[in-house]
Image: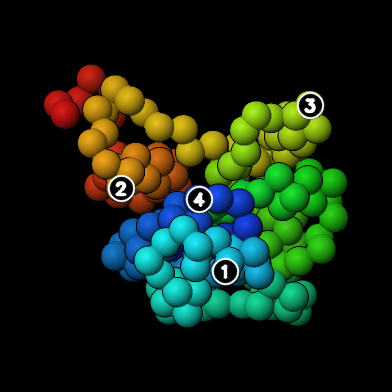
Amino acid sequence: MERKIAVGISGASGAIYGVRLLEELKSQVAETHLVVSSWGEYTIREETGYTPEAVKALASFCYDPGDMAAPLSSGSFPLDAMVVAPCSMKTLAGIACGFSEDLIMRAADVCLKERRPLLLLTRETPLSRIHIENMLRVTDAGAIVMPPVPAFYTRPQTADEIVAQSVGRVLDRLGFAAPGLKRWREEI
């Protein structure tokens, strides 16, 4: 049975994480439901060689971030998990407070209330106390905060290898094959 995974791309730096995740999920025949914020579209254009349209074409289904009537906004929609990659501090704050201002925040809120896996690839540094408290709040609610931190034991040679490692960790956590993941003490 095909697994249904929601992917949110917010406006934080690191849009490539969401793009590569979509590519990997597509290659593994997962059904993906994508929401890209307006600032997410901006970072896709600024940081990657992709257009927002090309990224949206990677998903099985794509929704406007303002469409609060989309299937993802209801707990009755049979979703297996959600990943927000990258997750801006604004999106984290909305999720932490249950403030469903857009479809990314609402879909994340639904995952929490339905006790479904929610992975947040938070992107910010340094962190303020507010950021840390919001991370604690979503963790206490059941989310997994997974900043895409480079693993240097893999001895990465390119930015692509660093991205592949982080995306591999997400795939592994979701129970998918993780071809880009190099594990500790595994032959490099």
Q: Which residue is mark 4?
A: 14
The spot of residue 3 in percent (x, y) is: 44, 63
Q: Residue furthest top?
A: 185
Query: Is residue 175 at least partly visible in the picture?
Result: no
Q: Amino acid at mark 2?
A: Asp
Q: Secondary structure at mark 1?
A: helix
Q: Amino acid at mark 3?
A: Arg
Q: Amino acid at mark 4?
A: Gly
The spot of residue 81 in percent (x, y) is: 55, 55
Q: Quadrant of residue 138?
A: top right
Q: Which residue is mark 1?
A: 41
Which is more toward the observer, 90 or 115? 90
Nearer-N-terminus badge (2/3): 3
Nearer-N-terminus badge (4/3): 4
Q: Which residue is mark 3?
A: 129
At 40% from the left and 41% from the top, the residue drawn is 166
The spot of residue 69 in percent (x, y) is: 75, 79
Q: Quadrant of the N terminus?
A: bottom left
